[in-house]
Amino acid sequence: EVQLVESGGGLVQPGGSLRLSCAASGFTFVDYIMTWARQAPGKGLEWVSAISRDGGSSNYPKSVKGRFTVSRDNAKNTLYLQMNGLKSEDTAEYYCVRVGLGASFDYWGQGTQVTVSS
């Protein structure tokens, strides 16, 4: 059974940092591109990062580029998202997502809440 379990969310002040983790199990982690997505209250889903199978390349939307860094440890089957310079608009539920066949987002974690507020 594929499982993705996020952790590391919480309340942080503007300008602060958080590191999210996603523990993967039930599949061969190194075989899959992985992503992070988020959903803010009352808004649609937004993709915030993607990382290649070997961790050698990554992509970000303009909204987080330069502030967020995605990484992975294939030996530990774990995906990370380092978030620096957090803004109130980064407040959202953050999800770890596996990219399956045909670039579909086929498995999602349960999410971890990030709240940026003073």
Image: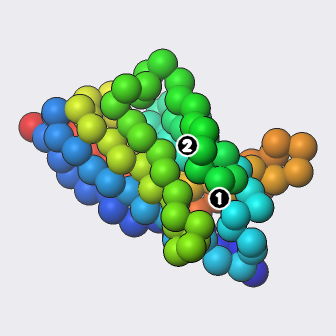
Q: Which residue is mark 2?
A: 37
For the point 26% across and 56% down, the residue is 10
For the point 37% across and 26% down, the residue is 66
Report if residue 88 is visible in the image: no
Residue in front for this viewpoint, 102 or 31:
31
Amino acid type, residue under disc 2 in the picture: Ala
Left or right of 59, for residue 92: left
Image quarter (top left, top right, bottom left or bottom right) of the N terminus: bottom right
Q: Secondary structure at mark 2?
A: strand
Mark 1 near mark 2, Cβ–Cβ under 8 Å?
yes
Report if residue 100 is visible in the image: yes
Query: Which quadrant holds residue 117?
Result: top left
Query: Which quadrant holds residue 77?
Result: bottom right
Q: Which residue is mark 1?
A: 108
Spatial separation of the CA atoms under disc 1 and disc 2: 9 Å
First along the sequence among labels 1 and 2: 2
